[in-house]
Every structure is written in structure tokens, then in C-alpha cells.
Amino acid sequence: MPVYQAEELNGHKYKMHKFTKAMFNVGSLENHGDHLPFGTDCLVSYLLAKEVADHFDDILLLPPLYYGMSEHYKDFSFTVSLRYETMTELLRDILLSLRREGIYRVFIFNGHDGNSAPIEIAARSVKVAHPEMKIAVQDAWWITAGQLLPPGTFEVWNGLGHAGEGETSIALALFPHLVEMEYARGVVPRLPPHADLKWKFSELTNTGATGDPSKGTKEKGAAMRKVLVDAVVEFIRYLDSIDWEYQQFRT
């Protein structure tokens, strides 16, 4: 199916096509070690979102958001960050603009950990103020991929890490021309179990990467790409089948 990219449409085409859903990705512009491009979070989430949109004829794909909340990464160059408040309001404005256009079903494909809190606050506040809005989020593809793939797919830290094995693998599958594996170096940090000790990224690594990017392969990335796209397509089809509504409790 054709992918309808908002930036390529005009008024006539938009009026002729009745879009019932919109999708957009949220990335970042920040350091990803010495081997991955600064735009990795946006490139991955946008290319995956584009593949998902290809399975539907009623999804309007919005342009990628290259900037995110990256304050915790700014000790490593080159990092351009939005403030929490700015990021939250940006997302709210996008959601409210879609509502004004009569598009009430929105899927957000997140590509960066720092965006999770702003997405939650923006989406929740819009939903509470406007209950007709149906907002779904793929919040952490890097965790979802590890949950979907067979045990043993990854060699180190279940593929986790910033510019680690998993992220490097999917970059090799999606944009190999931008990956320079000869510079891939990472650190596996010792994190406390059962609790989340808040960190600034320079406390975890001196390379700009965590995990082991040297274990990344195109084959692992291709497997990640497939399970992620398949899972999101299946999820959206399920949402369509229930009209994007929670099913009523049965008593």
C-alpha cells in the first residue's frame, strides 16, 4: 500500500482521502558513541513507523521529530535537547492539532528513552481533557524486541544499551551506510536490581555507549525489524477491531 506522508500531500489529496488514524515518531539528536549517527533514535523509529504505515490505507504518517528530551546525554557531543516542558507541550500541540483535524486515533512510535515521560504526560493530559482521543504508544522498541525474539538472540545484556548490541544491530539493518563498526565500543554498567537509580549518562560510560555494540550484526537487526513491525501492525489491527476502546468490564 502507499504510505501517505503528510509533508507530501496537498489540500486536494488530503480532502479526497479520509484519514482515520495518524502516526508519528519521536526521536532525538544526540551522541550514540563513535559508531552510530546522532539521529539514530529518529531514523530507527521513523523507518519502522513507515513500514508499519505501509500495511494500512487510512494512516497519515507525520514528519519525523528529530529533537527530543536528551538532557541526561548532554555530556557527550553532539547533543541537542529540548526541555521537559518544551517536549511535553510540543507533543500536546501535535495531538490537539490532529484532534482539530478530526483525527482521533493516534499512534506514537517512540525512539528515545528520554521522551517516555513527556509522551506520557502529554498523551494522558490530552486524553483526560478530550476522552474521544484514542492514543496508543510504542514506548520502548529496544525492550519489546528482546521480549519478542527467542532467548539467546543477543549475546550481551539481552541486547540492551544505548548504542549497544540491539540498537547497533537494527541500525545495521536499516541504515548500514551510516554505521562505522570499527569505532564500536561500549560499557556494561552495574545497575542496582529491583529499583531505578536515576543516572546521568556520563556516570554509566566513558564511550557514549552502553552494552556491547561490537556484538551487533545485520542479521540480528533484520530479526528485530521483522518482529517489531509485525507486532505493531498486529496491535493496530487489534485496536481497529475494538474501535480503539477498552472493552467493558464484565460483572
Image (cartoon, rainbow, N blue to C red):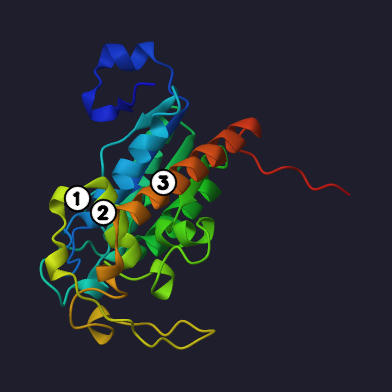
Q: Is residue 7 left or right of residue 4?
A: left
In front of the other: 83 or 247:
247
As displayed, is residue 190 above or below residue 237? below
Q: Can residue 153 be seen by looking at this rendering?
A: yes
Q: Can residue 34 be seen by looking at this rendering?
A: no
Q: Is residue 113 left or right of residue 246?
A: left
In front of the other: 56 or 61:
56
Question: Would you say the residues marked 2 and 1 are in contact, meaning their CB atoms lie under 8 Å apart?
Answer: yes
Mark 2, secondary structure of its residue: helix
As displayed, is residue 204 above or below residue 240? below
Of the image marks 3 and 2, the number of the one nearer the N terminus: 3
**Distance (Cα) linking label 3 and label 2:** 20 Å
Amino acid type of the residue tagged 2 in the rendering: Ala
Mark 3, secondary structure of its residue: strand
Amino acid type of the residue tagged 3 in the rendering: Ile
Label total for image: 3
Query: Which residue lies at the image location 34% right of the left edge and 84% below the top edge?
Result: 189
Residue that label 1 marks: 176
Mark 1, secondary structure of its residue: helix
For residue 143, which quarter of the picture? bottom left
**Distance (Cα) linking label 2 and label 1:** 6 Å
Residue that label 3 marks: 108
Residue that label 2 marks: 171
Query: Which residue lies at the image location 35% right of the left edge and 60% below the top edge?
Result: 115
